[in-house]
């Protein structure tokens, strides 16, 4: 974890605040567009937010947080109780939404989904690549960074205020793309589903707020062996690997508990995990908040 202090917290759109975090012990860890960090909030919750500032600024991180009306306690705490000057621990940046090298980009943002795409747009424009941002929101006042993006990038930005001029035609946008263009999309699930159906699969990249609903076989019990401690933990059907390990005293940091943030990633030494995450676990790793086992046991580097 990194020690930070809240430098500024200020409203930037309806129900959205920007939080600037200054490193308390010197420069912060570097990051690339698409990365996010975990905020360890004082109410014992851990929440993930995309970094939306300038990757060249090692003194500060910036995130933007929308106050969700059905908040599970994270966004509500940020909006109601966080204040400038408060110390806050944050994780090292993780990036499950990396920017591929391409000559042309289309960025599609829905509401608060602008946060990972803002530094992406900055990066590719500075690199001289062709870029367009399509930014969709229910009202202009609810779209963070909209005025700044228009002022900075002009005609590269197309705003769609759904209450006034409807939604973008993704089919038409797909026909405008060059053959090597990559599409990056972040926003609510219906928008992502429509975009995914319209754009070429191999060049479409999306970051979702919630996992895609999928069906798996029934849970089977298995053993989790902690290689370093020698402890064997029984994981019954209906109990996640993460909960079983935590209850046995093997404390694993976790955030979303839905397989989308990656904060609980652990190493698998032996056995075959059943990956149920939305990230795409690398070889030899799994996310125990959702992953189970296809073998009778998993040996973990714990």
Image: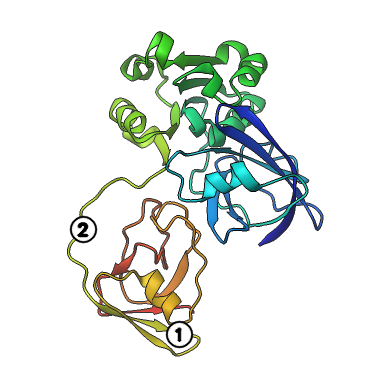
Location of residue 4 by image quarter: bottom right
Question: Which of the 4 image quarters holds residue 271?
Answer: bottom left
User: Which is more toward the observer, 134 or 104?
Assistant: 134
**Mark 1 or mark 2, which is nearer to you?**
2
Looking at this view, is 107 or 89 the one in front? Answer: 89
Residue drawn at point x = 55 percent, y = 41 percent? 34
Tell me which colouring the rendered structure shows: rainbow
Q: Position of residue 42 (x, y in %)?
A: 63, 58
Q: CA distance from mark 1 to mark 2?
A: 28 Å
Identify the secondary structure beneath mark 2.
loop
Q: Secondary structure at mark 1?
A: loop
Residue 15 found in image quarter: top right
Provide residue 129's location: percent of width, then percent of height: 58, 24
Residue at image x 44%, y 21%?
A: 138
| Neighbours of disc 1 within 10 Å: few (<14), some (14-19), many (20+) | some
Residue 51, image x, y percentages: 61, 42
Image height check: is 243 above or below 190? below
User: Total number of numbered labels?
Assistant: 2
59 to the left or right of 201: right
Which of pointers 1 and 2 lies earlier in the amino acid sequence? Answer: 2
Q: Is residue 35 above or below residue 112?
A: below
In percent of width and height, residue 140 lies at 53, 17
Q: Which residue is mark 1?
A: 227
Q: Residue furthest left?
A: 217
Quarter of the figure that contains the N terminus: bottom right
Residue 216 is marked as: 2
Label of residue 85 in the image:
none
Between 68 and 61, which is closer to the camera in this rendering?
A: 68
């Amino acid at each position: 974890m990194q020690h930070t202090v809240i430098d500024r917290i200020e409203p930037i759109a309806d129900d959205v605040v920007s939080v600037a975090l200054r490193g308390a012990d010197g420069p912060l860890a570097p990051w690339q567009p698409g990365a996010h960090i975990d905020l360890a909030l004082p109410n014992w919750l851990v929440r993930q937010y995309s970094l939306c500032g300038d990757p060249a600024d090692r003194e500060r991180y910036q995130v933007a947080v929308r106050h969700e009306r059905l908040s599970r306690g994270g966004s509500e705490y940020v909006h109601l109780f966080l204040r400038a000057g408060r110390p806050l621990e944050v994780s090292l940046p993780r990036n499950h939404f990396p920017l591929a090298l391409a000559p042309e980009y289309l960025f599609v943002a829905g509401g608060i989904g602008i946060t990972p795409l803002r530094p992406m747009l900055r990066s590719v424009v500075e690199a001289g690549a062709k870029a367009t941002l399509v930014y969709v929101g229910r009202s202009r006042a609810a779209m963070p960074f909209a005025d700044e993006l228009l002022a900075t990038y002009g005609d590269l930005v197309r705003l769609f205020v759904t209450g006034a001029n409807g939604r973008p035609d993704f089919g038409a946008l797909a026909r405008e793309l060059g053959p090597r263009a990559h599409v990056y999309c972040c926003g609510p699930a219906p928008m992502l589903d429509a975009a995914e159906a319209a754009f070429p699969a191999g060049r479409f990249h999306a970051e979702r707020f919630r996992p895609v609903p999928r069906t798996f076989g029934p849970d089977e019990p298995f053993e989790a062996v902690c290689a370093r401690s020698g402890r064997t933990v029984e994981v019954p059907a209906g109990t996640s690997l993460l909960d079983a390990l935590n209850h046995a005293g093997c404390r694993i940091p976790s955030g979303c508990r839905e397989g989308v943030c990656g904060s609980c990633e652990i190493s698998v030494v032996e056995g075959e995990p059943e990956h149920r995450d939305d990230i795409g676990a690398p070889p030899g790793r799994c996310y125990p908040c959702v992953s189970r086992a296809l073998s009778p046991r998993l040996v973990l580097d714990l």
